[in-house]
Image: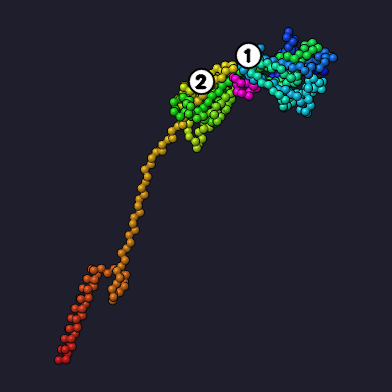
Amino acid sequence: MMNKIFSTAATAAVAAIALTPMSTGTATTVGTGTATTVQPTPGLALPNPEQRGTLSVTRQYSDGSPAQDIVEVVVCHLTHDKNGQGLDLTTQAGWDRAGDLTLEEALELSCAQTWTLSTTGGVAVFEDLPLGLFRVSSLYTSYGPEGTNASTPFLVTLPTTNQAGDGWVYTVGVYPKGQDPLANIGGVVWYDQAQDGRHGDDDEPREGVRVRLYRGDPQNGSGTIFAVTYTNKEGRWEFTGLPIEIMTVRYDITPLNGPQTTSYSFTIYGLDSHANPETGWTTPVQLIARDWVHKDAGIISNPTPTPTPTTPTTPTPEPTPTHPTPPPTPGPGLPVTGVAITAATITALTTITIGLYLRFNTAKHQNNNNNGNDND
């Protein structure tokens, strides 16, 4: 029969778990790393099924200092393996199955029951637990986004054996690996309706603004791109788990200024908006461990340019077509020659006619006179 405490490590070089005796009878796991098998003295009886246990979880940073951030520690009781076989640690078969279970498999198993406590001074104590195999994990509730894993999940049995391996310990202390102190930075982008640089209650958030995070200060030629994100529907963005160093944020509203959208720029700098109105750069900031830095930005819409009025061109009217005067209808007895008959023409014709008449009558009178003389 064997008793195991299971854990995972960020690197293989992390020391293995060890069990140390305590004056109170508590077995404590020190550090984190690969699973360590504790061989109890041959002939040790199985644990008493009537017993209840206590699990104390203490979070520490890699330098041994207690973690002061508040996290929720979740203890999950696993009662069956992936094949549905029982993990009852009051039986030898249960211990054997627990010893064959990997953390990867355990993460896929459902919890028969869970307990959740927030740490106080880095410690969470779970009392009156049933005996069995437990999966322990922790979630941030402060100094980080909810749901972010605050330490590496691991498996632990309750009870464990004492250091000599000849007895059971029902009060167990574990020290899961805590994350080194890291920093976080975030902000919000809003539409500054008043254009006064202040984030008012009625100012709407702006989604889709690109946010670039730089290491150092690129404005002085000493920075490099570190990460890129976009604001969400609430206008918010964040980068978490950052190294403790100088960082610079630059806002980019280019994605908002599409060909069919309103043109935007940044609002007044220095009040609630930290973006340079002309460039979108913020001032470099030294990140602090376990702290949040806020770099916000207000944007305004640029006025739509007024189009230059143009004088409409009046079209030149087309000339009215001139219709020729139709010839008059000729009277009776006059030939139709197609020549217009005017008053002058009539007068000339009349003169000619009268002249011809007089000439004709004169010639006739002379002719008659001649004829008369012949008769005489």
Dot 1: element: loop
Q: Position of residue 165 (x, y in %)?
A: 80, 12
Question: Colour scheme of this structure image?
Answer: rainbow
Task: Say which of marks 1 and 2 sits in front.
Answer: 1
The x, y position of residue 175, in whole percent, is 69, 15
Q: Residue furthest right?
A: 43
Who's the residue at 34% across and 55% down the image? Answer: 319
- Which range of residues does the magenta coloring cover? 137-150
Which of these two is toward me, 19 or 340?
Answer: 19
User: Can you identify the residue that label 2 sits on?
Assistant: 283
Q: Amino acid at mark 1?
A: Gly
Q: Position of residue 184 (x, y in %)?
A: 58, 20
Task: Give the spatial CA distance, label 1 vs label 2.
Answer: 35 Å
Neighbor class of circle 1 (other Cα within 10 Å; few <14, some 14-19, many 20+) is some
Q: Could you say which disc has been placed on residue 249 in the image?
A: none
| Res. 121 mark | 1
For badge 2, the amino acid type reads: Thr
Is 224 positioned to the left or the right of 53 in the image?
left
Identified at 33% across, 61% down, the residue is 323
Residue 43 falls within the magenta-colored stretch: no
Q: Residues within 10 Å of mark 2 (few under 14, many from 20)?
A: some
Nearer-N-terminus badge (1/2): 1
* Residue 127, placed above or below residue 310: above
